[in-house]
Amino acid sequence: MIYVLAFFVPPLALLLNGQIFAAIFNAVLMIVFLVIGLVTLTPFLWLIAPAHAMIAIYMRNEDRRHRELVAAIEKHGPPANWRR
């Protein structure tokens, strides 16, 4: 659901995901590319901000999963058949 929000309102999705500086950067990015897109008549430039938001959210989620996996390995040890 966060990805749908990231497509339509990228800065809000980043704020809800806890990425304050990325949200500010994304808001500036959105405004700049919206203005450039309207001036140069290239309407697809507004897609850059949602793409940035989706990639940032995905990377944060992958980082969280990685940290959880490392914590589980540190707590319980590696799997039984690991590096024979």
Image (cartoon, helix red, strand yellow):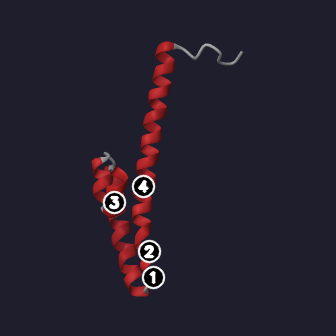
Q: Please name the amino acid that badge 4 sits on.
A: Met
**Is residue 42 rendered to the left or right of residue 8?**
right
Q: Earlier in the sequence, mark 3 or mark 2?
A: 3
Q: Are marks 4 and 3 in contact (CB under 8 Å)?
A: no
Q: Which residue is mark 2?
A: 45
Q: Are marks 2 and 4 in contact (CB under 8 Å)?
A: no
Q: Earlier in the sequence, mark 2 or mark 4?
A: 2
**Label 1 crowd bin: few (<14), some (14–19), many (20+), radius 10 Å:** few
Task: Specify the quadrant that holds the C terminus.
Answer: top right
Q: Which residue is mark 1?
A: 42
Q: Which residue is mark 4?
A: 54
In the rendered image, residue 12, in percent from the top left (x then y), is placed at: 27, 56
Q: CA distance from mark 4 to mark 3?
A: 8 Å
Q: CA distance from mark 1 to mark 4?
A: 21 Å
Q: Please name the amino acid that badge 3 sits on.
A: Pro
Q: Nearer the viewer, residue 56 or 8?
A: 8
In the rendered image, residue 45, in percent from the top left (x then y), is placed at: 44, 74
